[in-house]
Amino acid sequence: MLKRLFATHAIASSSPHDSGRSDGGDPTLKRVLTARHLITLGIGAVIGAGIFVITGQAAAEHAGPALVLSFVVAGIACALAALCYAEFSAMIPVSGGAYAYAYATLGEIVAWFIGWNLVLEYLFAVATVAAGWSGYFNECLGIVGHWLNISLALPDYLSQAPLTFVNGHHIEATGAWMNLPAILIVTALTALCYAGITQSSLVNTVIVSIKLLVIALFLIFAFHYINPANWHPFIPPSQGPGQFGVGGIFRAAVLVFFSYVGFDAVSTAAGEARNPQRDLPIGILGSLVICTVLYIAMSLTLTGIAPYLSLNTAQPVATALEAHPQLLWLRAVVSFGALAGLSSVILVMLLGTSRIFYSMSQDGLLPRAMSKIHRQFRTPHVSTLVGGVSAAVMAGLFPVSILGELVSMGTLLAFTTVCVGVLVLRYTRPDLHRSFRVPGVWLVSIAGAIICMYLFWQSFRANWPLMLGWTVIGLLIYAGYGYRHSMLHAKSGKH
C-alpha cells in the first residue's frame, strides 16, 4: 500500500503530446499562448489584491511602514520558488503546475496533497479577491452617483458577506443577505473562461494594460505628497506576537505572500502554451520581477502619503488618497483601475482552478467528467463550471479577512514541494533534458523550502484548525475516490 501511495508518474507521460489541434477524436486544449501572453497572465494574477486590498491590512495590523520589507521577504521566497518552477515547467510542460511536478517526483499521495492545496490557493483566492472587488465596485457606484447627484451604492445587505469569523474560528451571521457584486463578477468571468483561452487571454491583456497605467499614474502624482514623517518609526514597536516589530514584518510577509500567488498560475497554463519549454520560464520569472518592483514602489508610496494605521480598510489606496484633496480626481481613477485589476486576478485564478481540476481528473483522482474538453470552445468546461460555482458561493457568503491567509498557506506548501522536487529529480533523473536549469540548485531549493515553511508556520499557528480541517476533507476524498480510481494504478495493473 505504501508503495502505491508514493508511486510516481513517468516523466515521458508528462510531455506535451498535442499541437493544440483536434483532428477527429477527442478535442484537446488549444496551444495558443506565447511568452507575452504568459507574462501578462502572471501580471494579471499577481497585481491586484496585494496592492488594492491586502496592503492596508498588512500595514495597519502587522508591519507599519516596514511593509516594504515584508514584500522583500515574500519576494525572495517567491524568487527561489520561481526558479524551481521555471526548471520544472520547461521539463514537464503540462497543465497542473506543482501538482504535476509532485506526481513526477514525490508520489501520488504527495501530489494529491499539493493538488488539494492548489485548489485551496486558487479557489479561495477567487473568493477573497471577489470580496475585495465588491468593495471597490460599491466605491465606483458611489463616485458615479456623486457625479450624477443620485445614490447608486448598493445597500449593505446586498454587498456584504452574510457570515463572518469571530476570533478566527467561530462563524456568526452579519444580517446581510449576500455579497451580490462578488457573485456576479465570478459568474461573468467563469462564462469568459468557459468560452475559450484565446478570449480570456485577450481580455486579460486589455485589463493588465489598464491597471498598469493606473498604477503608473498613482506613483507619479502621489510621489509629490509623500511625507517622510509617516515612515517614522519605520518598524513600529512590538505590541505582541505578529503585531509590529520584527515579528510583525514576517507576519505581514505571510499576508502579502497572497499577493504573489499569481505567478505559479502561469505554470497551470502549460497545456495551452505554444512553446512551453522556452516560454514558461520567461512567463514565470518575467512576471515575478515586474510585479515585485511595482509592489515595493506602491508600499513605500502608500505608507508615505497616509499614516499606516488609517489604511485598514477594504480600499486602502482610495483611503490614502482621501487625505489629499488635490488627489481626489486620482481616487476615482484608482478605484476604477482597481476594479479592472481585481477582475484580471479573478480571471486567471479561475483558469488555474479549472486546469488543476482537469489535471487531477485526467489522472483519475477526481471524477472523469472534469477532464472533458468542450468540442467547440476547447476548454475544460465541466471543471470551469465546478470551480466557478464553488467560488461564487464562497465569495457571496464569506468575508475577505479569513480567506487570504488560507490562500497563502496553500501556496507556501506548493512552493515548498516544488523546491524539494526539483532537487530530488536532479538526482533521480539526471538524464532528463532541462532547457532551463536552476543555478546553485542546492542553495536555491533548500533555502526556498526553508523560507516557505517558516512563513507557513507563522500563519499555521493562528489558523491550524482551518488548515487541518481542509487537509482532512481532502484525504477523505482521496481515500473514498482517488485511491480507487487512480489511472496510474490502473495502467500498472494494480487495481
Image (cartoon, rainbow, N blue to C red):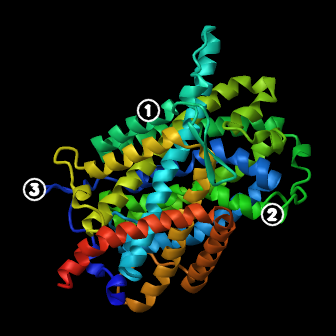
Give the residue type at disc 1: Leu
Q: Position of residue 88 (x, y in %)?
A: 42, 74
State left or right for residue 284 relative to residue 300. left
Counting other residues with Cα less than 10 Å from the Cα at mark 3, is it few (<14), some (14-19), or many (20 or more)?
few
State left or right for residue 233 relative to residue 394. right
Q: Position of residue 285 (x, y in %)?
A: 52, 63
Q: Which residue is mark 2?
A: 241
Specify the quadrant of the image occupied by residue 289. bottom right
Along the viewing direction, whichever of 434 and 1 lies nearer the viewer: 1
| Residue in the image at 60% along x and 33% along y | 135
Q: Which residue is mark 3?
A: 23
Quadrant into which the N terminus falls: bottom left
Q: Secondary structure at mark 3?
A: loop
Q: Which residue is mark 1?
A: 184
Along the viewing direction, whichever of 94 and 294 lies nearer the viewer: 94
User: Is 462 rendered above or below residue 448?
Assistant: above
Q: Position of residue 373 (x, y in %)?
A: 21, 53
Quadrant into which the C terminus falls: bottom left
In front of the other: label 2 or label 3? 2
| Residue in the image at 33% along x and 82% along y | 8
